[in-house]
Image (cartoon, grey):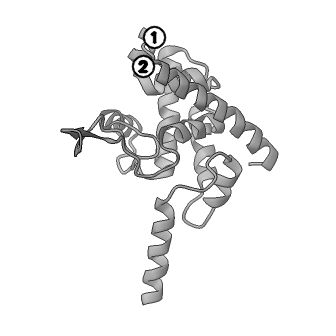
Amino acid sequence: MRIVFLIALLMLVGCGTAPNRIDNACAIFAQRDGLFNNWARDARTASQRYGVPVPVLMATIYTESGFRARARPPRTKLLGFIPWTRASSAYGYAQALDGTWETYRRETGRWGASRSNFGDAIDFVGWYHRKSHDTNGIPLQDGYRLYLAYYSGHSGYERGEFSSGTRQAAQRSASMASRYENQLRACGY
């Protein structure tokens, strides 16, 4: 009985940690291709459902959380040293805000979806990028502009409200999408 418990515990711990070598999509998928996880399948499913290329989906998660399941924005400090509130409710792989996550669950009927579950998070990213396409006319292959809308929201994107940091993050995401695309082509995923 102890062995079964230990194996189950090790599997859960492995699911909650970020993969190594997050700069290589093939390595990420190889690390998360198992009995209980199959990130490549989850990514392909989201891509087919929403029409967003796998590299763009993966690059968004790379930029948002570095593939950390329980990522959150840092806490602000009260009096310069006491941990206080967080800048936003962003959480999980996709750094989805509470309200946006609830809209996603309501519109897709995925009531059990969790922001710390990769399959749910990548589906969310695909859903959001598809909404950016439908709302703002952004091509589904345009990782730069999709990321700008993802980070700034559809209204913020429409107003063109992007800080230099947001533009840099969008460029990082677009560059990573290009890199992931070449890697995935080379390894046959």
Q: Is residue 151 left or right of residue 89?
A: right
Task: Name the residue tied to disc 1.
Answer: 160
Query: How many numbered markers are drawn?
Result: 2
Point out the tag, 1 or 2, that comes first from the N-terminus: 2
How crowded is the residue under tag 2: few (<14 C-alpha within 10 Å), some, or many (20+)? many
Where residue 21 appears, as percent x and y from the top left, is 64, 52
Helix, strand or loop at disc 1? Answer: loop
Q: Extreme left residue here?
A: 79
Residue 59 place in picture, x, y as percent: 59, 37
Residue 2 at x, y percent in the picture: 42, 89
Give the residue displayed 47% in from the left and 30% down from the top. 128
Check disc 2 and give the amino acid type. Answer: His
Which quadrant is the N terminus positioned in? Answer: bottom left
Which quadrant would residue 105 be assigned to in this image? top left
Along the line of sight, the residue nearer the viewer: 162 or 43 = 162
Q: Residue 154 shows which numbered tag?
A: 2
Residue at the location (50% across, 50% down)? Answer: 118
Residue in the image at 54% along x and 24% along y: 168
